[in-house]
Image: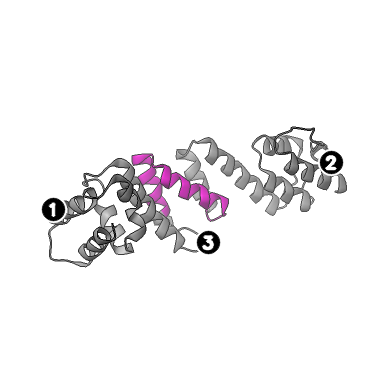
Amino acid sequence: MSDAAKAINELARDCCYSEEEMIKSLELLITQLELGQQLELHSLLSEEALSMIYSFRKRLAVAPAVQEHLVWRYFSGKVSKSGDSIDAKLFDEMIQEFIDSRSLGIESIIIQAVKSDFLTDSQLEKAKSVLTSKVFEKEYLACSFRKKIDSGVILDSGDIRKLLEIRAYSILELAIDKKAVTSDGLNCFVAPGEGTPDKKMKSNLFRKARLN
């Protein structure tokens, strides 16, 4: 696999070939590998090689799962270099790629960005308009409540019940610690019985709510 990766990295640096020749070479280098190796290939490719593959992605005859791994690696690298925010152009490119391919890899990158508070309000709403998974919905709600708490909003019992429903325990703990919960909201925290799911988390929240 390392030989194939080296050849692809060299191909990305070589400007002597036409696009068609590069695509054929890429297909040959990738498909000669076992499927498992194809799926791991992205970890050995240079940024330049990933950019080349991404630009040819719609014309490359490789397994869909392999293409998804390569596209995920391309965007993951871009986002990791962008610091604690994501450039508008890069974000829009990811959203369009998700619309076109419904890539779970792209969705995972966006969800992680939501969890890390890397998105602007407009980016968050744009993501909400196209991502519909339960995982995204949970992180979107959690992020929305986190922003409310940071801006000084006090959460009521309806907010607390919603956060308990989606098991957003870190946000609930943040709200209690910042005294951003109404008295009715604090009463939503009850001592969990034996065998209750997430008993340790709920016990901690109940304890903190009683001390508030």
Chosen colour scheme? one colour
Which residue occupies the extreme right position in the image? 211
Q: Is residue 127 magenta?
A: no
Query: For the residue marked with disc 2, what is the amino acid?
Result: Ser
- Determine contact: label 1, label 2, CB under 8 Å: no
Q: Viewer-nearest of labels 1 and 2? A: 1
> Relative to 85, is 183 above or below?
above
Q: Magenta segment, principal secondary structure? A: helix
Q: Which span is picked out in magenta? A: 91-119
Sequence order check, earlier mark of 1 and 2: 1
- Work out whether mark 3 precedes mark 1 in sequence or the reverse, and give the earlier one: 1
Q: Which residue is mark 2?
A: 183
Q: Which residue is mark 1?
A: 20
Label disc, if present, on residue 202 of the rendered structure: none
Give whichever of discs 2 and 3 has the lower sequence position: 3
- Quadrant placement of the N terminus: bottom left
Left or right: residue 119 versus residue 16 is: right
Mark 1: give few (<14), some (14-19) or many (20+) Cα within 10 Å: few
Mark 3 falls on what kind of element?
loop
| Picture coordinates of residue 196, whole percent (x, y) | 74, 33
Q: Does residue 70 sit above or below 131 in this rendering? A: below
